[in-house]
Image (cartoon, rainbow, N blue to C red):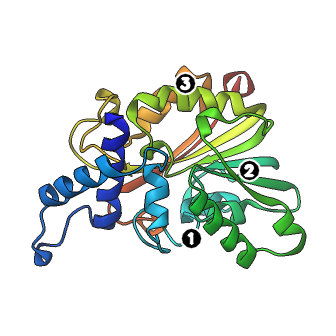
């Protein structure tokens, strides 16, 4: 219960402070004051409501907090097969079935849909799922809309969805408690087909300080979002049987969020790479 309450507080701080990560001084309110208020709120809130649902239920708008108002540009480059323009691999992404956990408003879900690909977005927040369906209704039509669906559920408890040929993980790994990271990697290994591929948009990556891979249970700065690094993600996925296919730093002009760097990686199961 303490962990749940702490997670709610951190999520609420992220929501209220936005991508700047600080409370503007002009407001005259310190993080300590907000923390005390949110501690009281968390103690009184229903244990049924998760931190994420609380954030969305307040009315999270496009472009607010973690919402980038669009599919991450670096991932769009991969979807559209334009990797060579940035010195990356131009190998097409797998078709078939794709999964986007923590899909938020569903931007990536819509972008991934094509004639040969059906996409499932997964959300733990019912309000977020409603927002994703509304966005998909506006962005897609006809058979394209039929190829995109939103499921409500916990990524770690997911059953019955079958296997996937492609997975996309962006603001999901950085949002989960650090003690769940190993389970995150093994769950992806379970969900992806033997010839499947996982794309990770590694974020937030910050210059200086300790590498989050060296502080696996905390990570510098706390979170969410928890600090990430290419090495951390590589070590997590290799331990679960993946191997690196490509791993590239995202140039600033392709960054979806300006307050931290991004890397983009493509990972395959070791037997497939070999």
Q: Is residue 101 visible?
A: yes
Quadrant containing the C terminus in the rendered view = top right
Residue 153: percent from left, percent from top: 64, 45
Nearer to us in this view, 38 or 159: 38
Front of the two marks 1 and 3:
1
Label 3 crowd bin: few (<14), some (14–19), many (20+), radius 10 Å: some
In the rendered structure, are the residues bearing label 1 and label 3 in contact, judged by CB atoms less than 8 Å apart? Answer: no
Residue 225: percent from left, percent from top: 37, 50
Rendering quarter of residue 200: top right
In the rendered structure, are the residues bearing label 3 and label 2 in contact, judged by CB atoms less than 8 Å apart? Answer: no
SS at mark 2?
loop
Rendering quarter of residue 271: top right
Residue 198: percent from left, percent from top: 64, 40
Q: Residue at x 44, y 58 (%)?
A: 54
Closer to the chain start, of discs 1 and 3, is 1
Left or right relative to 172: residue 211: left
Question: What residue is shown with label 2?
Answer: 93
SS at mark 1?
loop
Q: Residue at x 42, y 51 (%)?
A: 51
In the rendered structure, are the residues bearing label 1 and label 2 in contact, judged by CB atoms less than 8 Å apart? Answer: no
Residue 139: percent from left, percent from top: 72, 76
Label 2 crowd bin: few (<14), some (14–19), many (20+), radius 10 Å: some
Nearer to us in this view, 90 or 258: 258
Q: Is residue 94 visible?
A: no
Q: Residue at x 60, y 41 (%)?
A: 154
Left or right relative to 248: residue 110: right
Q: Residue at x 71, y 65 (%)?
A: 110
Question: What residue is shown with label 1?
Answer: 70
Number of the label disc, if any, that sits on residue 238? 3
Left or right relative to 85: residue 207: left
SS at mark 3?
helix
């Amino acid at each position: 219960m303490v962990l749940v309450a702490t997670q709610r507080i951190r999520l609420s701080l992220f929501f209220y402070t936005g991508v700047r990560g600080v409370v503007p001084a002009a407001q005259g309110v310190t993080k300590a004051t907000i923390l005390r208020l949110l501690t009281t709120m968390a103690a009184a809130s229903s244990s049924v409501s998760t931190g994420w649902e609380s954030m969305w239920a307040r009315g999270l708008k496009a472009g607010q907090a973690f919402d980038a108002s669009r599919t991450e540009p670096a991932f769009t480059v991969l979807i559209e097969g334009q990797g060579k323009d940035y010195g990356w691999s131009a190998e097409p992404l797998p078709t078939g079935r794709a999964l986007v956990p923590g899909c938020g408003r569903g931007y990536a879900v819509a972008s991934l849909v094509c004639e040969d690909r059906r996409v499932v977005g997964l959300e733990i927040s019912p309000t977020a799922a409603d927002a994703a369906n509304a966005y998909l209704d506006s962005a897609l039509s006809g058979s394209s809309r039929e190829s995109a669906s939103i499921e409500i559920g916990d990524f770690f408890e997911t059953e019955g969805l079958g296997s996937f040929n492609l997975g996309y993980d962006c603001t999901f790994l950085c949002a989960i408690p650090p003690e769940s990271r190993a389970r995150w990697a093994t769950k992806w290994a379970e969900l992806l087909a033997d010839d499947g591929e996982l794309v990770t948009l590694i974020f937030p990556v910050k210059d200086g300080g300790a590498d989050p891979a060296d502080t696996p249970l905390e990570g510098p700065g706390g979170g969410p979002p928890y600090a990430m690094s290419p090495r951390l993600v590589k070590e997590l996925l290799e331990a679960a049987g993946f191997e690196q296919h490509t791993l590239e730093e995202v140039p600033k002009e392709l960054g979806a969020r300006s307050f931290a760097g991004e890397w983009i990686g493509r990972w395959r199961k070791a037997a497939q790479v070999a």
